[in-house]
Image (cartoon, rainbow, N blue to C red):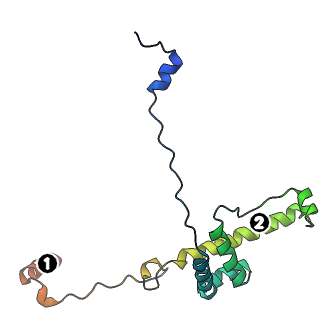
């Protein structure tokens, strides 16, 4: 029995390369309540966390709670938008366009300051290569007894030319 005839559209589709599989997002780690308590304690004493809380103009406790909230709910939205009528129903005063613009500019300015702090937050203190204005460390001294005298003479000749 001969194979069934295909219409031209089916032939074109069969010639296309197979689609690559869609990469799956890595699963987020789920923290236990005891791990979250340790993280909170660490945040409360961390100098960078205090600096970030200061930039955001919130108490360090509130900053730590917000970090833990994001760790518990990694897919939670950072910004929420509500219609004016819904805000009024909830008892909020609806901000004017100028007030919204002012708040967004302030938030963007704070975000830039936070990014500057975060850029340096994970640099090890002994690693001077990431710091601005850091001097490049000098090469370690070489023991003259381990240098081949013939090689040293050859290098000296080449340098003197």
9 over 2 or under it: above or below: below
Task: Give the spatial CA distance, label 1 vs label 2.
Answer: 63 Å
Query: Which residue occupies 65% across, 79% down?
Result: 52
Name the foreground residue: 18 vs 84.
Answer: 18
Of circles 1 and 2, the one toward us is 2
Q: Quadrant of residue 146?
A: bottom left
Q: Quadrant of the N terminus?
A: top left
Q: Which secondary structure, mark 2?
A: helix
Q: Quadrant of the C terminus?
A: bottom left
Classify residue 46 as left or right of residue 133. right
In the rendered image, residue 144, in percent from the top left (x then y), is placed at 15, 89
Query: What residue is shown with label 2?
Result: 104
Circle 1 crowding by C-alpha within 10 Å: few under 14, some 14–19, many from 20: few
Query: Which residue occupies 51% across, 77% down?
Result: 122
Q: Quadrant of residue 45?
A: bottom right
Classify residue 19 as left or right of residue 115. left
16 over 34 or under it: above or below: above
Name the foreground residue: 114 vs 11.
Answer: 11
Query: Which residue occupies 54% across, 60% down?
Result: 27
In the rendered image, residue 109, in percent from the top left (x then y), is placed at 70, 71
Q: Which residue lies most toward the left here?
A: 150
In the rendered image, residue 58, in percent from the top left (x then y), is placed at 74, 81
């Amino acid at each position: 029995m001969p194979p069934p005839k295909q219409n031209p559209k089916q032939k074109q589709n069969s010639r296309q390369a197979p689609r690559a599989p869609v990469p799956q997002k890595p699963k987020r780690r789920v923290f236990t309540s005891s791990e979250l308590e340790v993280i909170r304690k660490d945040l409360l004493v961390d100098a960078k966390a205090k600096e970030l809380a200061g930039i955001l103009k919130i108490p360090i406790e509130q900053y730590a709670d917000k970090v833990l909230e994001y760790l518990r709910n990694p897919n939670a939205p950072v910004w929420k938008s509500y219609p004016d009528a819904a805000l009024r129903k909830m008892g909020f005063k609806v901000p004017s366009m100028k007030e919204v613009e002012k708040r967004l500019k302030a938030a963007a300015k704070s975000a830039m300051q936070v990014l500057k702090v975060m850029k340096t937050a994970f640099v090890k203190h002994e690693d001077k290569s990431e710091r601005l204005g850091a001097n490049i460390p000098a090469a370690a001294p070489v023991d003259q007894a381990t240098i081949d005298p013939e090689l040293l003479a050859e290098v000296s000749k080449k340098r003197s030319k």
